[in-house]
Amino acid sequence: MGHGIKALVFDVFGTLVDWRGSIVREGEAWGRAHGISVDWAAFADAWRGAYHPSMDRVRRGDRPWTKLDDLHRETLDRLLAEFGLAGLDEAEKDHWNRVWHRLTPWPDTVPGLLALKPRFALATLSNGNVALLLNMAKHAGMPFDTILSAELCGHYKPDPEVYRMAYGLLGLEPHEVLMTAAHNSDLVAASQEGLRTAFFPRPSEYGPAQVKDKQADHRFDFVATDLVDLARQLGAI
């Protein structure tokens, strides 16, 4: 194909897995089993809403490196009280915090990865910690060749160190690595470090009221409708 790409690295939350729908579905099932009524969509949105602010405190140096599982747990402890779920025991809280390890992939995710795998090296490049990403990949059947995580360099995206780590650990030049995401800002940051970029939208990631990231707002190397379409553009199908 002449594009010179040897590896794809993927944003995960929202790009490959439906975090919002997964949390809502698990919450509704758990609520029915326990006779508890909660606005699970609001719960999921509030939990994810703390994602960037909590990581930004680490990125600014306001607190030492803290992995995402621990940041999620800090937010969960607060939300359980806010949503009237303060009576959970430690095992239940730990199980709930690990819902992020059990997220469901979008329908095109696994077929797209399987199509790409014979021709390219495939890796995560996520702010999730290694254990979270490994468990999620196994749960969802996502066939990565390796797990690359912000945890490995002690920085969170969009810090440049994360993108530099990716091509360095893969033993490749930046232009040989394709950063793949459904988020414009992630791709802009990757492109500034020399990585190639691929965008496809996930217009329901944030629910029916989603506004951002419904289309490519910048010029990226590839713009696709979904991961299978991207695989086709890359000559893997």
Image: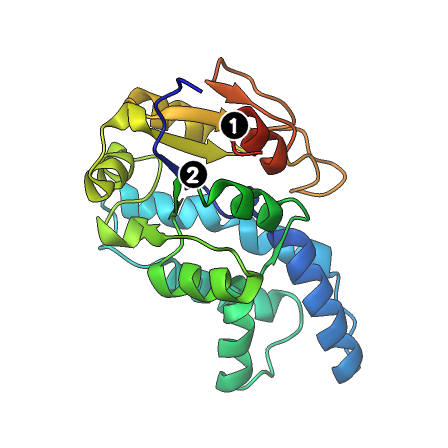
Task: Mark yes or no: residue 96 visible.
Answer: yes
Look at the picture and state if 228 lies above or below 152.
Answer: above
**Amino acid type, label 1:** Gly
**Residue that numbered label 1 is attached to:** 235
Look at the picture and state if 102 lies above or below 93.
Answer: above
**Residue that numbered label 2 is attached to:** 119
Q: Position of residue 4 (x, y in %)?
A: 34, 23
Residue extending farthest top: 219
User: Whole-Å distance between the Cαs marked 2 and 1?
Assistant: 9 Å
The residue closer to the viewer here, 92 or 117, is 117
Q: Position of residue 134 (x, y in %)?
A: 41, 63
Q: Position of residue 154 (x, y in %)?
A: 23, 50
Residue occupying the point 58% across, 34% down: 237
* Numbered label attached to residue 97: none
The residue closer to the viewer here, 82 or 36, is 36
Residue occupying the point 70% across, 40% down: 204
Look at the picture and state if 148 lies above or below 137.
Answer: above
Task: Mark yes or no: residue 200 visible.
Answer: no
Q: Picture quarter containing residue 102?
A: bottom right
**Amino acid type, label 2:** Arg
Figure quadrant of the N terminus: top left
Q: Secondary structure at mark 1?
A: loop
N-term-proximal mark, 2 vs 1: 2
Look at the picture and state if 112 lies above or below 149.
Answer: above
Q: Picture quarter containing residue 169?
A: top left
The residue closer to the viewer here, 149 or 112, is 112
Q: Secondary structure at mark 2?
A: loop
Q: Dot 2: within a 10 Å radius of its alpha carbon, few (fewer than 14), some, or many (20 or more) residues? A: some
- Tags 2 and 1 in contact by the CB under 8 Å rule? yes
Residue occupying the point 60% across, 25% down: 224
